[in-house]
């Protein structure tokens, strides 16, 4: 059956995400860092592909996201964009590409949109990024905001810790959520906050909230693709559900290949080329 022209086939846009919240339709986002996984996620009907700066950890093997560069973001986002037919592509702006000044943020975020074809950017932070968000939106750059556990502040937090545990911290997060919406952010990631707070913020806002470690009451959910596919085994945060155990499967396949080569079972003549009769002489 053709899905041409149907809601299922239409590209996901920034206004469509906001409309999904109004319709009560859940938003599903995963991270992607290359063409192949972007394409698979897009084919699976995932609505948003986030080129997360988590690439520093799951792709590069670093302990934090802090060293990721603008050049890496440009490189990975362009690959993801080529794999996305329908999904909205959001580039996660790396540490120090948007915090130094509003002008620098506009230049760097603008480069990401111009050079990669991404549809939007994500920036971490609360009141300290409100003016930047406002200016980015004014010049036409859609912004996904991100509060709660913002990994670029990992050292200030003293680790990857749940945020919003005190009444004061919860009030501050609510104030930040409203300020970011007012500045024009089209959605808000809530990371590692108590589910009661995530629910309250979600009910308070007109823009959709997308949770990770924020419980079931947000408008959407995001997971790091390596976590949900069981590819990243070094640690598993409490909020991760593994939908496959691909690391085990990859090891099994590679061991089977190694054994076949070592024992002469691969390649067989079937996997080989023969000379054509006219080439044989
Ligand atoms: O970098 C990332 O993957 C993220 C998500 C976890 C929201 O920011």
Image (cartoon, grey):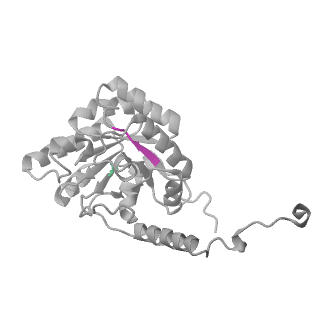
- Residue visible at 44% across and 35% down in the picture: 71
- Residue visible at 40% across and 58% down in the picture: 225
Is 124 placed above or below 46 here? above
Can you give x and y, in whole percent of width and height, for residue 179 in the image?
Answer: 24, 38
Can you give x and y, in whole percent of width and height, for residue 126 in the image?
Answer: 23, 39
Asked whether residue 205 is in view, the answer is: yes
Q: Is residue 72 left or right of residue 192?
A: right
Q: Is residue 208 left or right of residue 115?
A: left
Which quarter of the image is occupied by the C terminus? bottom right
- Which one is in front, 70 or 252? 252
Can you give x and y, in whole percent of width and height, for residue 194 in the image?
Answer: 17, 58
Q: Find the magenta span and give its range.
A: 89-94
Q: Indicate whether residue 90 is drawn in magenta.
A: yes
Q: Is residue 188 left or right of residue 47?
A: left
- Which one is in front, 263 or 274? 263
Is 256 placed above or below 141 here? below
Can you give x and y, in whole percent of width and height, for residue 224 in the image?
Answer: 36, 56
Q: Is residue 116 left or right of residue 163?
A: right
- Residue visible at 17% across and 52% down in the picture: 161
Is 17 placed above or below 278 here? above
Which quarter of the image is occupied by the N terminus? bottom right
**Predominant SS of the magenta segment:** strand
């Amino acid at each position: 059956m053709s899905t041409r022209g149907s809601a299922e086939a239409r590209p996901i846009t920034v206004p469509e995400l906001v409309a999904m919240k109004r319709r009560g339709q859940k938003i599903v986002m995963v991270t992607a860092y290359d063409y192949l996984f972007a394409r698979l996620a897009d084919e699976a009907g995932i609505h948003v592909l986030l080129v997360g700066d988590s690439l520093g950890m799951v792709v590069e093997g670093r302990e934090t996201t802090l060293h990721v560069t603008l050049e890496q973001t440009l490189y990975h986002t362009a690959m993801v964009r080529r794999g996305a037919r329908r999904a909205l592509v959001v580039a996660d702006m790396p540490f120090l590409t948007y915090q130094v000044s509003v002008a620098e943020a506009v230049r760097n975020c603008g480069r990401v949109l111009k050079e990669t074809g991404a549809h939007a950017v994500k920036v971490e932070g609360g009141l300290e990024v409100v003016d930047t968000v406002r200016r980015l939106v004014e010049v036409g750059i859609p912004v996904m905001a991100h509060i709660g556990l913002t990994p670029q502040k990992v050292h200030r937090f003293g680790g990857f810790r749940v945020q919003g545990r005190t009444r004061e911290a919860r009030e501050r997060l609510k104030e930040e959520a409203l300020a970011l919406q007012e500045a024009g952010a089209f959605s808000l990631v809530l990371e590692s906050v108590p589910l009661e707070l995530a629910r309250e913020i979600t009910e308070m806002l007109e823009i959709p909230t997308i949770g990770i470690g924020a419980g079931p009451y947000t408008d959407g959910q995001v997971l790091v693709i390596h976590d949900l596919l069981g590819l990243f085994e070094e640690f598993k945060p409490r909020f991760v559900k593994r939908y496959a155990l691909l690391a085990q499967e990859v090891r099994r396949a590679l061991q089977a290949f190694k054994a076949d080569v070592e024992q002469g079972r691969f390649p067989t003549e079937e996997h080989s080329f023969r000379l054509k009769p006219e080439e044989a002489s």
